[in-house]
Image (cartoon, helix red, strand yellow):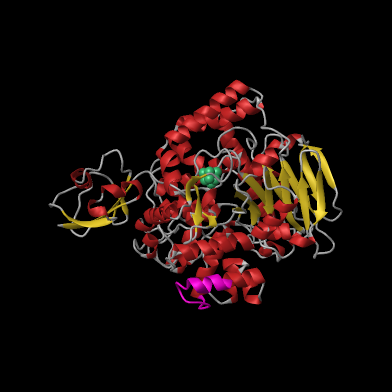
Amino acid sequence: MYKGIVRVNMKTLEITHEDVPEKWGAFGGRAMTSAVLLDEVDPLCIPLGKNNKLIFAPGLLSGSSAPISGRLSVGAKSPLTLGIKESNAGGQAAQILGRLGIRAIIVEDKPEDPGKFYTLEVRAGSITVVECPELKGLGNYDTVDKLMAKYSDKKAGYITIGQAGEMKLLAASIACTDRELRPTRHAGRGGLGAVMGSKGLKAIFLDDSEVSMRQPVDKEAFRAASKKFAKALKEHPVTGEGLPTYGTNVLMNIVNEAGGLPAKNFRTGSTDCAAKVSGEVQHDMILERGGKVAHGCHSGCVIQCSRIWNDKDGNYLTKGPEYETIWAHGPNCEIDDLDAIAIMDRMDDDIGLDTIEMGATMGVAMEAGILEWGDADGVIKLLEEVGQGTPLGRILGSGAKVTGECYGVDHIPVVKGQAMPAYEPRSIMGIGVTYATSPQGADHTAGYAIATNILKVGGFVDPLKPEGQVELSRNLQIATAAIDATGLCLFVAFAVLDKPEAFEAIYEMLNGFYGLNLGPDDVTELGKTILRAEVKFNRAAGFNEADDRLPEWCMTEPLAPHNTVFSVTDDELDSVLDFV
Amino acid sequence: MIINLKFFASLRPYMPGDKDESWVDVQMETNVGEVLDYLKVPPDKPKIYLLNGVHADRETLLKEGDVLSVFPPVAGG
Ligand code: SF4
């Protein structure tokens, strides 16, 4: 078992081990990454420079038998938003890190020779850095194939970057392998793949074959709380039935019917494309082709929203794809062909790109006239260019903002430089508040107001009116930050919002595992502590109120079909995180 | 009067004629719940009713040309 904190210096290739300092003692996941960044990284540093740090932190419960607790937080100053970033990923990495006793890997400095790439080998008995020239220039799939041949194709995990990360493109993601050792689970948002590339870190091999599950301090209490939690998740119709059956893309129809689906680069709130790429259609196609519904992205997931997508011949092509990806590359670009979208998803995963950012970028590219609306073949060709690093490919791979600015587009859907995801802030105003005010930039997961605005989970707040949205977003942002510290998948929130016993079980699992005595207020306080750190970092990085705003057209151009504009006032937006 | 009815996800099997949507002729003053009862949709199955894209409930009255979209509990992200 390691001491908790592992530091990897990419200039000297030295590895040091430290106990977790007391100030970070209660932190995991996003709480850990954001605390390390605030304490150790100059907010004014150049994101791709030697003074930025890249942090991998499993959640507090990762590596234990707590249900669905294997989410990984990756943190750094973002080259895309220029603010603090926590990007959250599934896959096996967090479970393995947790079992190895690692609370955070902090990657520091960068190699003197920018052409060199390294693999970090993390085993129970040793951690080493080795050069890996053979992986240079490879996509994530080939990288993982080569790593499996060298290390293990069994009980292991890999964290890798593709060509986009090596080229330090702003939309570059970090891939984590799933249970089948495929690089399909990405810390997508905020360009953290570029930070990993800037550090010359191509891959991390994680091996927990010689360690067992983490053991709780109070076995009985932990077991009882875990059981209670799993039961609540199974009983809730969304986490127990809806998500496993139809996956995240079940949202396509409902968001479209509600007039909240950003179509054609956020020009309208619904489109005929949606029905052709819906979760229901996807579900039927997956089953017809021998793919898999109800698949878990990591061991211990009891919701299983993931799926395996096979091509027309019945051969594995990619996971999911997820709702966000299908929206971004689909209705956002007037594309209604699920097979084409699945190819794009596979390419994004392989090149190592955030699917949301890339889909939004393609929408902007269509707006700019680089290609026609609905041109799926054109998108695939452009993605190839990103992987090859052509001049146009590098512009596109740098995201929606850079692409729009290079081509004089005045309708760029970003906040703090990051592309808005699959919900229109003009007709779902709660999510607009989250996009505007989250320290992470436009990020639906930071305060998922769709639950209450559209899905009637956790009550109902009318999406078409400004009333109640500030409080909704604030409470969700606090709760989300806390969940992101535990390693639990955010999708547990659907049950937690409706079932008091699911919320209780979260702090009871923490209490049982660590021998603590936390109550509901401590969970809220943890969420607030995280947000305080993130806002503080961003302010020191130069952010102010003006950065907490949506693009101007959200307030001035009414959106069909409801013909609404985003009408939460600036003063109200400034009050969202008033506790910091 | 004619309304456009759409069922989604696990409610799809309740749509007459093995389709995802249909146009049904209902009497004036019919509400959302009455149409669904007529189609034998168990009242505990639907959760979200969108009438012309706006959240409604079982008591909401229908009018000519309305689009009624009905969903079971769903979520994603
Ligand atoms: S619910 Fe979905 S995203 Fe969450 S851990 Fe399970 S498979 Fe992964």
The answer to whether residue A103 is above or below residue A338 is above
**Residue beneath the point at 25% across and 51% down:** B15
**Residue beneath the point at 62% across and 61% down:** A350
Q: Is residue A47 visible?
A: no
Q: Is residue A572 magenta?
A: no
Residue lying at the far bottom in this picture: please name it: A369
**Residue beneath the point at 68% across and 56% down:** A145
**Residue beneath the point at 64% across and 46% down:** A73
Residue lying at the far front in this picture: please name it: A313
Nearest the eye: B45 or A208: A208
The answer to whether residue A374 is above or below residue B32 is below
Quadrant where the N terminus of chain A sits is top right
Callout count:
0
Span highlighted in magenta in the image: A368-382
The answer to whether residue A292 is above or below residue A559 is above
Q: Position of residue A23 (x, y in %)?
A: 73, 36
Q: Position of residue A165 (x, y in %)?
A: 69, 62
Quadrant where the C terminus of chain A sits is top right
Name the side, left or right, on which A85 lies relative to A288: right
Q: Position of residue A484 (x, y in %)?
A: 59, 42
Q: Is residue A377 magenta?
A: yes
Name the side, left or right, on which A323 lies relative to A358: left
Nearest the eye: A221 or B14: B14
Q: Is residue A489 visible?
A: yes
Quadrant hosting residue A61: top right
Q: Position of residue B62 (x, y in %)?
A: 20, 52
Nearest the eye: A531 or A93: A93
Name the side, left or right, on which A306 lies relative to A41: left
